[in-house]
Image (spheres, grey):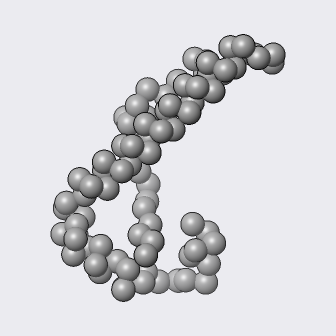
């Protein structure tokens, strides 16, 4: 995000206006919520695999450490529309 926003000090109207139209100013975010859910599921799957692998390697295990259960363990702070 830092790289694509470098040198930009204002939102880019040509990008956010179509997004706002499609989402009715953020009222219809179902598509984007579904994408976010899939991303979180992917994160959880990778963490689960990593935890299982750590059981069979030296240096301790990451299983049951910082246990992330699901969507409720995440908070969306911001999002960026990239065209």
**Quadrant of residue 47 within the rendered picture:** top right
Residue 69, image x and y in percent?
43, 26
Question: Which residue: 36% across, 86% down?
Answer: 14
Relative placement, left or right, of 15 versus 8 is left
Question: Which residue: 28% across, 78% down?
Answer: 18
Residue 53, image x and y in percent?
67, 20
Q: Nearer the viewer, residue 72 or 63?
A: 63
Q: Nearer the viewer, residue 49 or 15?
A: 49
Say which quadrant the C terminus sits in.
bottom left
Q: Is residue 18 above or below residue 46?
A: below
Question: Which residue: 62% across, 22% down?
Answer: 51
Q: Inspect this view and state whether residue 81 appears.
A: yes
Q: Inspect this view and state whether residue 66 appears.
A: no
Say which quadrant the N terminus sits in.
bottom right
* Residue with the most extreme top position: 56
Question: Which residue: 38% across, 36% down?
Answer: 71
Relative placement, left or right, of 6 versus 12 is right
């Amino acid at each position: 995000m830092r790289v694509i926003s470098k040198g930009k000090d204002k939102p880019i109207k040509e990008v956010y206006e179509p997004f706002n139209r499609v989402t009715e100013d953020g009222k219809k975010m179902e598509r984007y919520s579904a994408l976010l859910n899939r991303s979180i599921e992917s994160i959880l799957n990778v963490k689960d695999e990593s935890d299982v692998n750590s059981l069979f390697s030296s240096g301790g295990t990451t299983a049951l450490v910082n246990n992330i259960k699901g969507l409720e363990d995440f908070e969306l702070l911001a999002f960026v529309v990239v065209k």
